[in-house]
Amino acid sequence: MKQQQQPLSDAAIAEQAAQWVARLTADDPAEQARARAGFASWQAADARHARAGAALQALLGQLAQTPPAAAGRCLQAGALAARAAGRSRRQHAGATALALALLLALPSWLALQAWPAAWLLADLRTGHGQWSEQRLADGSLLRLNGGSAVSLHFDDQRRVIELAQGELLIDVASDPQRPLLVRTPQGEIRALGTRFVVSRQGAEATELSMLESRTAVRASGTTSEQVVMAGQALRIEAGRSCTLTPIDAAAVEAAWQGRQLVVNERPLAEVLDTLARHRPGLLRYDRAAIEGLRVSAVLPLDQPEQALRLLVTSFPQLRMRSTLAGWVMWVDVGELP
């Protein structure tokens, strides 16, 4: 007579759930594709699997405000810890509770530890989709948009703002004895007037848009300064002097106030970088696959999902798909995994 298979313990189910976490958040798109189908079948096979799956979705919701890279690392770290706990269930009576606790609680704890160092150490910062306004000690008015972080170095001799990530708009208070400087890894902007926007474009460039008066810009690794006047923009790259381009200063400011992203012939990857700062969860795309695609558009930063749909509509070769209850969004060329 065929021996009836014993039902899995709660610890074993917790271990399986942990393995699904690792597979669903893997870096390999093909592995994620295989995991999606298998995860659905696993949940349907047993009510306890369905409950574990629901707990996993709740965890992803809790992590929705975590920076994308940090959240992915947290989920995988939690999965590894939970699997380790599951393997020890025969040696420890409390393995079930430990595995479940690690699966649900450890990633959230790790999320608090895994913010990028520049963001953690910043004096002022915003989360996904958050906008802030701060009056600085010298009277300057500093505004940050989503996913931005700055460090302030103000004393009797200097006023320095380090833009670690994101974008700022500043109205500079006059102080002839202490010129205000905005620094990024690509260069230094010295305020000679009152009002301008600075944004980090990934790890390679900084963009300056002058709204009023003028600034002097020195790219990292160079000694000469370049003056940028109101109505001009400059892309700053380390070791290079870049060409000035004209802008409509009033339109730039209106876009900021309206929480819009206005781009003209901008690489699609840079546009997605910006949207990723404003969208909770993880936005993934293959930079190599979309290289060469450029965007001219007005996109709503306070509605990043709508902005993504507009991009997909504009580029028929693009595909967009969400996984893990919308927490992970894929944008790519052609058929997605």
Image: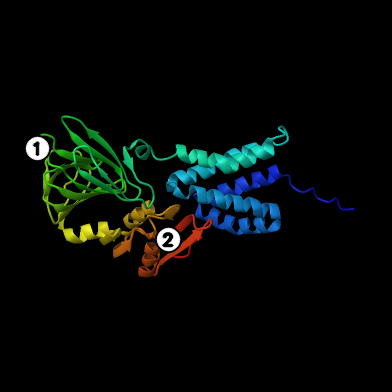
Give the residue type that dot 2 points to.
Asp
The picture quadrant where one finds residue 140 is top left
> How is the protein colored in the picture?
rainbow
Is 335 displayed left or right of 166 in the figure? right
Marks counted in the figure total 2
Q: Is residue 261 above or below residue 124?
A: below
- Rendering coords of residue 274 (x, y %): 33, 54
Is 193 displayed left or right of 124 in the figure? left
Say whether residue 171 is visible. yes
The picture quadrant where one finds residue 314 is bottom left
Between residue 40 and residue 290, name the one nearer to us: 40
Give the residue type that dot 1 points to.
Pro
Is 249 displayed left or right of 43 in the figure? left
Between residue 17 and residue 104, name the one nearer to us: 104
Circles 2 and 1: CB atoms closer than 8 Å: no
Between residue 321 and residue 333, name the one nearer to us: 321
The picture quadrant where one finds residue 101 is top right
Label 1 Cα neighbours within 10 Å, binned few <14 / some 14-19 / many ≥20: few
Say whether residue 77 is visible. no
- Residue at image position (67%, 59%) is 44
Residue tagged 1: 176
| Label 1 residue SS | loop
- Residue at image position (11%, 44%) is 192
Q: Nearer the viewer, mark 2 or mark 1?
A: 1
- Rendering coords of residue 200 (x, y %): 28, 48
| Label 2 residue SS | strand
- Rendering coords of residue 238 (x, y %): 22, 43
In the rendered image, the residue lying farthest to the right is 1
Between residue 86 and residue 173, name the one nearer to us: 173
Residue tagged 2: 332
- Rendering coords of residue 52 (x, y %): 64, 50
Label 2 Cα neighbours within 10 Å, binned few <14 / some 14-19 / many ≥20: many
